[in-house]
Image (cartoon, rainbow, N blue to C red):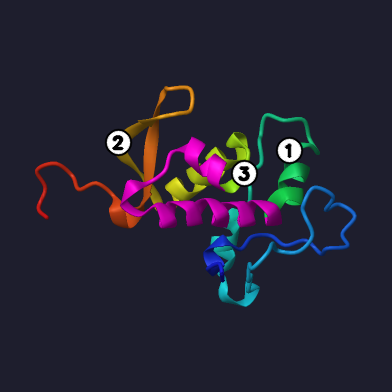
Amino acid sequence: MTIPPLFASYSPEPDDPNNDAAPGGAGAGVNVDKNHQSDALRARFNPPVRKNAPPGTSDVAAQRIARHSAVQRAKVYAVFVRAGVDGATDAEVEAATGIRAQSESSCRGELRVLALVVDSGRRRPTPRGRPAAVWVTANYAPKPEGGAA
């Protein structure tokens, strides 16, 4: 599976000693072509830097996980694409990908900001029985009430 350039991000050199948190390579089956991306798009997908953290902590962590987070975003998005109109909750995406909830919900949030996934307005129970938002890709977004079709 080739991942669209949208999911490419900062790619430190594999032998970079500061890259201890990112797994080697771009991930199984992921094609990242830096030549087909705009700098603005890449900057949009770089992990956020927390401004309230002590200097040299969150910004360093964000740099180290950049490549890994691009792969995670692609995996999360792929679950929504496969789910189609049925969509998926965060818990379902976590189960399908094996990505921990903290990372999965962050990836889904980034996809939401880019309008690639939207809240369907439906709710399904989590494994603990609590209602959870069902997210769908933008092409399955609910139509506004009373609007023209």
Can residue 44 be seen here? The reply is: no
**Mark 2–mark 1 CB contact (< 8 Å):** no
Residue on which the image places disc 1: 58
The residue shown at (9%, 53%) is 148
Q: Position of residue 104 (x, y in %)?
A: 57, 42
Q: Earlier in the sequence, mark 2 or mark 1?
A: 1
Question: Which amino acid lies under the numbered mark 2 shown in the image of this protein?
Answer: Arg
Residue on which the image places disc 3: 98
Question: Which amino acid lies under the numbered mark 1 shown in the image of this protein?
Answer: Ser
Q: Secondary structure at mark 3?
A: loop
Q: Which residues are magenta?
A: 67-96
Q: Quadrant of the N terminus?
A: bottom right
As measured in the structure, the alpha-carbon distance from the residue carrying label 2 to the one carrying label 1 is 35 Å
The residue shown at (77%, 30%) is 54
Can residue 83 be seen here? The reply is: yes
Q: Tag on residue 105? A: none
Residue on which the image places disc 2: 122
Q: Position of residue 111 (x, y in %)?
A: 47, 50
Label 2, residues with CA under 10 Å away: few <14, some 14-19, many ≥20? some
- Please say whether residue 89 is one of the residues in the magenta stretch: yes
As measured in the structure, the alpha-carbon distance from the residue carrying label 2 to the one carrying label 3 is 24 Å
The residue shown at (77%, 50%) is 64
**Mark 1–mark 3 CB contact (< 8 Å):** no
The residue lying furthest to the top in this view is: 129
Task: Judge depth for marks 2 and 1 and give the one in front.
Answer: 2
Question: Which amino acid lies under the numbered mark 3 shown in the image of this protein?
Answer: Gly
Q: Earlier in the sequence, mark 1 or mark 3?
A: 1
Q: Is residue 67 left or right of residue 21?
A: left
